[in-house]
Image (spheres, helix red, strand yellow):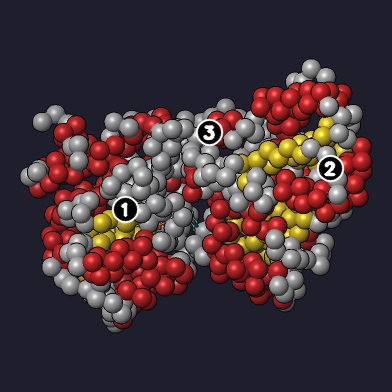
Amino acid sequence: MKNLLDHIHSPSDLRALNQKDLPQLAKALRAFIIDIVATKEGHLGASLGVVELTIALHYVFNTPEDLLVWDVGHQAYGHKILTGRKSLFHTNRQLHGISGFPKRDESDYDTFGVGHSSTSISAALGMAIASQLKGEHRHHVAIIGDASIASGMAFEGLNHAGVTDANLLVILNDNAIGIDPSVGALKQYLTNVKKGTEKQDTIFEALNFDYSGPIDGHDLNALISELERLKTVKGPKFLHVITTKGKGLKQAEENQVTYHAPGKFDSLTGELIVKSASSLTKFQDVFGLTLVELAKQNPKIVGITPAMPTGSSLKYMMDQMPDRAFDVGIAEQHAVTLSAGMATQGMVVFCNIYSTFLQRAYDQVIHDVALQNLPVIFCLDRAGLVGEDGATHHGVFDLAYLRCIPNLIIVAPRDEIELRNMMYTAQLGLEHPIAIRYPRGYGAIADWKQPFKKLDIGKGEVLKPGKDIAVLTVGFIAENAKKAISEMSDPQRIAHYDLRFIKPMDEALLHDIFKTFKYIVTIEDGTVKGGFGTSILEFAAEQRYHLPIKVLGVPDLFIEQGTVAQLQKLCKLDAEYITKTLEAALLEIENH
Ligand SMILES: Cc1ncc(C[n+]2csc(CCOP(=O)(O)OP(=O)(O)O)c2C)c(N)n1
Ligand SMILES: CC(=O)[C@@H](O)[C@H](O)COP(=O)(O)O
Ligand SMILES: [Mg+2]
């Protein structure tokens, strides 16, 4: 057979193969993943690392009757390809294509939707207990990485599983790295287990798991015989597997951080295809470089990231000031309460968390920070639509879920200079916690490194005067509004205000606006329900203003994956749609 992969339309085809042919299949699967990701982009290293494990799991277990739960799911490309999605794989992470993560309504083999980490043990345990209650005899397997298992929720799942007799197998895929190198005492412990210097029972045995390993996760025969054995063992079981992230592509093995999600690359040589240099800077780098600048002047500043030093650019501070910048691992809840603890002692804490991952630490924001009014500075990265990671990762809920929390200041800088100035203002000393939200990727101002300027908390500004309609924006979406207004037949009739602060609102400015204009349009890259536009509707109702108000934002749906531009169009947040809305509003005014 020329390419074994072409003959695999479902795991039944895989299970019909002779075991001796599986290494050949692994080779073909790896080559296929490399080929597609090289041009279509996506997560590479993690999927390359589990090629053999994926094949072995579908070979030994009777999927989808037996249930595989992938943690995070960025490593599940091989699983997708072997479970009937090979011909669709070129649409991975694209608009209307398949999701980059397992998704229940995409396939019966995707037993649990993922994207955020550390859910697999709890979910698989839930399935195992349900099977037991229903009298079904199925296997339930959670496959979790070394960085994801260090998260609190994974420990909660292990702790519970250890006192059940549920038919659960937890596989630790230990490659000693997350996106960035894994951190923490557990990482050191696992290293000792691998070296054989950890003599006592493993932690997992102490938690009542039947522990086996570590075994070589690239040795198909070893994997298959151990999985076959584990199928006969009752109760909670734990298999420790050692793999290499990026396995099979030299560059990806050697530069695991970059090749976690490398963008386009040459599938033959592995060389990255470098995009033409932009004169602009990513918001992330503006954050990271500004923090270093401020920290050099203010010794009380510390920086915290839960496992995203490269993504957030906190790495600049970690490199230059390792004592004052902390990667705490995938531990959003801990990151927030750690920040709160430091703040009680007078430290000026910049806690950088992706907007979507802060959802994990909601109670910590309320109970540990806001209720005690501790002036933690949250930098919410990846706010708004993030693009190809899709529904699990869009940072569109933060305005709604933060706005209802007393004491919390919420601000969305419109550009890089405002981000800098907001960071500068916050570290001068605020009496409240603050959330500064900004998007993924490039800003709009090349010359962003301007001298710092203190901003007034709760003050918006007029960006453009006008006569009939006031457009109110917060954050970077102001760019779309500017473009939309400039493309109108009569831009003079439209005013544009950047309210900047979602909380506290600039009530004086709002009174002026409501008294001056005939129509209000609000625009935000967050949910229409409960966000910035809602706050303007509430203000109007409370103050008894009766102007028409149109709220543009992310509709009450989970938004799929695609480029940010495509998704903005889908959500009717693109400049073209804004122009149409404004033209329609002008007609409405005239017809009144
Ligand atoms: C709650 C949460 N925080 C952060 C992330 C971002 N993230 C995605 S993958 C990853 C590293 C996962 O490492 P590991 O579990 O070791 O898997 P590997 O990539 O090595 O296969 C991180 C931090 C996430 N998906 N979910
Ligand atoms: C799987 C996961 O959660 C991360 O790898 C995420 O895709 C990173 O997103 P950024 O590329 O925006 O850092
Ligand atoms: Mg790992």
Q: Is residue 440 visible?
A: no
Residue 202 got which mark?
none
What residue is disc 3 on? 563
Residue 546 got which mark?
2
Q: Name the mark nearer the viewer: 1 or 3.
A: 1
Quarter-wise, where is residue 157 in the image?
Answer: bottom left
**Element assignment for label 1:** loop
Q: Is residue 534 visible?
A: yes
Residue at image coords 81%, 56%: 504
Looking at the image, is 545 positioned above or below residue 162? above
Quick one: label 1 or label 3, which is nearer the N terminus?
1
Q: CA distance from mark 1 to mark 3?
A: 27 Å
Quarter-wise, where is residue 363 in the image?
Answer: bottom right
Residue 111 got which mark?
1
Name the amino acid type tagged 2.
His
> Is 259 on the left or on the right of 544, as rendered?
left
Residue at image coords 56%, 59%: 359
Residue at image coords 36%, 72%: 158
Looking at the image, is 208 positioned above or below residue 330? below
Q: Name the mark nearer the viewer: 2 or 3.
A: 2
Callout 1 crowding tier (Cα within 10 Å): few <14, some 14–19, many ≥20: many
Looking at the image, is 476 positioned above or below residue 530? above
Looking at the image, is 125 positioned above or below residue 494? below
Callout 2 crowding tier (Cα within 10 Å): few <14, some 14–19, many ≥20: few
Q: Name the mark nearer the viewer: 1 or 2.
A: 2
Task: Tell me if the residue at label 3 has its CB under 8 Å from ligand 2.
Answer: no
